[in-house]
Image: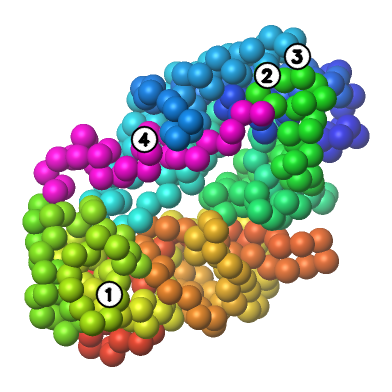
């Protein structure tokens, strides 16, 4: 049994490493080569390049492809580039725009992992007869009797399990995540010791196709008709202002509402059908229940029948919750206080055991129920 848990010698084990051009995936490729595996690095070309700067650090851009190729040459592995721009545009960019236009707050990085990375790259690695697909994600994987489980990474500040909740069991059995048991600082130290050209390269910060975090500019480019003026209402249904398009707003937003009030106002709900923004004070943001769609379940029924932990945003805290799975969707009762949860984001399930925080799966947030609004008002506002 080799270090990847595969019953072969390392020299007879073929692995594909997903290389984004960053320090994490470069270190993974170098470690696999150093251990004696037969390594092929794959870099995905996903979108048309934009001008990069120190303030605009993205992944999968032209410079990243060059960096991945240089690392591959240095460590002497095969390197291939897959041109997935059309797939990425149709399944990630257009999905992102559709979600924003529907008043949601999408997470394109999850969609990217779910489609072009772990679906299409997974298939390509299988076609190459590779024994495993290896990535630089910070998530832990534990295999017992041929069945793989996913856990949060040791470095919880870098943990990416939230973005990988949609990984299927078949994919998880095939995937490997060597960085799940080390800290980011150790990764950079390894890169420096191996003299990799990306050792001090900054981490990507922006969504790759959203320069400088300006979501509205992307939507304006692809869907200019989305900028349709409408009304801003208070929770009593009274018009108190106007907006220039619902795509300029997200749930929980405070700045940029441009409505005067004695107390701060927040975006409580976005109604795309009626093209209205509903605002209220902060206590109106507290969410008691959410409904999830497009579930991916990795845990057992017994595990999910317990009170579990959930995360409703990547940087959010763990929340106690009860989950009821109902065929294609789930109802989640949140037992802790949480505000500003938005449809379009993910809700990820976790259970705590002696190993750590085990990922049980999750789903996409479809509907939220505000805790401090009356039932009738909630029914009026929440129309999804």
Dots 1, 2 in contact, CB < 8 A: no
For image coordinates 62% across by 28% down, the residue present is: 201
Decide which of tag 4 and tag 2 comes sooner along the chain.
Answer: 2
Separation of marks 1 and 2 at Cα, in angstroms: 48 Å
> Can residue 254 be spotted in the picture?
yes
Asked whether 331 falls inside the magenta stretch, the response is: no
Location of residue 334 in the rendering, given as x and y in whole percent from the top left corner: 50, 78
Q: Secondary structure at mark 2?
A: loop
Dots 3, 4 in contact, CB < 8 A: no
Q: Nearer the viewer, residue 94 or 326?
A: 94
Residue at numbered disc 2:
197
Location of residue 274 in the rendering, given as x and y in whole percent from the top left corner: 12, 65
- Looking at the rendered structure, which numbered label has been put on residue 211? 4
For label 4, the crowd category at 10 Å Cα-Cα, with few meaning under 14, some 14 to 19 and many 20 or more, is some
Q: Is residue 123 above or below residue 167?
A: above
Q: Secondary structure at mark 4?
A: helix
- Frontmost of labels 1 and 3 is 1
Separation of marks 3 and 4 at Cα, in angstroms: 32 Å
Decide which of tag 2 and tag 3 comes sooner along the chain.
Answer: 3
- Looking at the rendered structure, which numbered label has been put on residue 265? 1
Which image quadrant: the N terminus?
top right
Separation of marks 1 and 3 at Cα, in angstroms: 55 Å
Marker count (numbered) = 4
Q: Nearer the viewer, residue 334 or 195?
A: 195
Dots 2, 3 in contact, CB < 8 A: no
Residue at numbered disc 3:
75
Asked whether 204 falls inside the magenta stretch, the response is: yes
Separation of marks 4 and 1 at Cα, in angstroms: 28 Å
Magenta span covers which residues? 200-227
Q: Secondary structure at mark 1?
A: loop
């Amino acid at each position: 049994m080799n270090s990847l848990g595969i019953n072969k010698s390392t020299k007879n084990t073929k692995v594909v490493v997903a290389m984004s051009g960053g320090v994490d995936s470069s270190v993974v490729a170098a470690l696999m080569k150093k251990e004696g595996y037969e390594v092929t690095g794959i870099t995905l070309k996903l979108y048309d390049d934009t001008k990069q700067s120190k303030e605009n650090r993205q992944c999968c851009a032209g410079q990243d492809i060059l960096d991945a190729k240089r690392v591959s040459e240095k460590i002497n592995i095969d390197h291939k580039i897959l041109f997935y721009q059309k797939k990425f545009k149709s399944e990630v960019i257009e999905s992102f725009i559709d979600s924003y236009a529907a008043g949601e707050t999408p997470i394109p990085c999850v969609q990217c992992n779910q489609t072009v990375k772990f679906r299409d790259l997974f298939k390509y690695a299988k076609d190459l007869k590779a024994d495993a697909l290896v990535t630089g994600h910070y998530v832990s994987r534990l295999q017992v009797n041929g069945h793989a489980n996913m856990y949060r990474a040791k470095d919880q500040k870098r943990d990416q399990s939230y973005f990988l909740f949609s990984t299927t069991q078949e994919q998880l059995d095939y995937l490997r995540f060597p960085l799940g048991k080390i800290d980011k600082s150790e990764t950079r130290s390894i890169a420096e010791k191996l003299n990799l050209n990306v050792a001090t390269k900054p981490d990507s910060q922006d969504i790759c196709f959203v320069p400088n975090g300006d979501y509205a500019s992307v939507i304006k480019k692809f869907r200019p008709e989305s900028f349709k003026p409408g009304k801003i209402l208070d929770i009593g249904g009274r018009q108190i202002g106007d907006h220039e398009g619902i795509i300029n707003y997200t749930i929980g937003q405070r700045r940029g509402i441009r409505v005067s009030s004695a107390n701060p106002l927040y975006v409580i709900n976005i109604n795309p059908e009626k093209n209205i923004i509903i605002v209220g004070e902060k206590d109106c943001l507290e969410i008691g229940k959410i409904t999830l769609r497009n579930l991916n379940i990795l845990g057992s029924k017994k595990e999910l029948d317990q009170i579990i932990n959930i995360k409703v945003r990547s940087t959010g805290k763990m929340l106690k919750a009860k989950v009821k799975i109902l065929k294609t969707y789930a109802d989640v009762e949140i037992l802790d206080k949480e505000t500003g949860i938005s449809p379009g984001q993910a809700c990820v399930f976790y259970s705590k055991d002696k190993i750590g925080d085990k990922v049980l799966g999750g789903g996409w947030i479809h509907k939220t129920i505000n805790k401090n609004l009356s039932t009738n008002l909630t029914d009026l506002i929440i129309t999804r």
